[in-house]
Image (tube, helix red, strand yellow):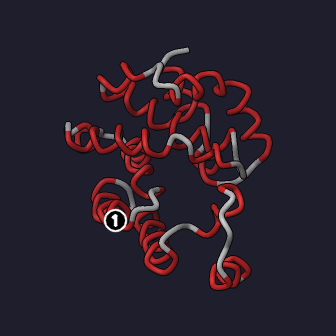
Amino acid sequence: MTADDVLHFWFQQCRPWQWFRRRDSFDALVSDRFTALVERALAGDLQEWADRPSSALALVLLLDQFSRQIWRGEARAFSGDQQALAVALMGLQQGWVAAEPQRPRRQFWLMPLLHSEEEGVVAKAIPLLEQWADAATADVARRNLMQLQRFSRYPQRNAALGRNSSRAEVLFLEG
C-alpha cells in the first residue's frame, strides 16, 4: 500500500462527515484496510514518507487520524501523536502546508497541533487553522486550549490512558 492509497481513501473515497463522526462501521473499515500500515508508521518503517509533501501528509493521517479510528477508546489511539506532530511541524517549516491548495488537506496537516496536550502547541494551531483551514476547526482548537488551561490535559482521554479523573474533570465530562 502506498501513500497515494492513503490519500485517495481519505480524501476521495470518504466523505467529510465520516472524518469527525464516530461510526463503528467506519472505524472497522479503517482498521481492516490500514492497521498494518499504521503499525509500520508507528514503528518508524515509513519515515521516508516524510521526505515529500504528499506522502508526509499520508503519514500524518496514519499516525494522527487512523490510529484514533483503529484503537478508539484505547491508549494506543494516541500512540502516534508525537510522531504526527513532528511531521506536521516539519510540513509547516518546509512550507508544504502553505503550498497545499486544498483546504481539507491543510486542515489535516494541522490536526496534530489541535490534538496536542501541550498548551503552547494548541495556541500556535489557532491562527494557523484560521488562516489555512476554517473558523469551525479554529474554534475546536480554542475549546481544546481552554480544557488544557483548566485541566492541563484532555479529560475525555483519561479512561483510555488509565489516568484518574479529578472531581472537576468528572463534573466536566458529565456536563
Does residue 39 lie above or below 90 as drawn? above
Read off the residue under disc 1.
126
> Can you tell which quarter of the image residue 47 is in?
top left
Residue 135 is left or right of residue 30, and the answer is left
> Can you tell which quarter of the image residue 68 is in?
top right
> Which one is in front, 101 or 44?
44
Residue at the (48%, 81%) spot, across then down? 150
Residue at the (79%, 45%) spot, across then down? 24
Q: Residues within 10 Å of mark 1 (few under 14, many from 20)?
A: many
Count of all numbered marks drawn on residues in the image: 1
> Can you tell which quarter of the image residue 171 is in?
bottom right
Does residue 57 lie above or below 146 as drawn? above
The residue furthest top is 1
Residue at the (76%, 36%) spot, across then down? 28
Q: Amino acid at mark 1?
A: Ile
What is the x, y in percent for residue 90? Answer: 27, 39
The residue furthest left is 94
What is the x, y in percent for residue 77? Answer: 63, 45
What is the x, y in percent for residue 46? Answer: 45, 21
Residue at the (37%, 55%) spot, across then down? 133
What is the x, y in percent for residue 33? Answer: 68, 24
Per the image, label 1 sits on a secondary structure element best described as helix
> Which one is in front, 50 or 148?
148
> Which one is in front, 118 or 140?
118
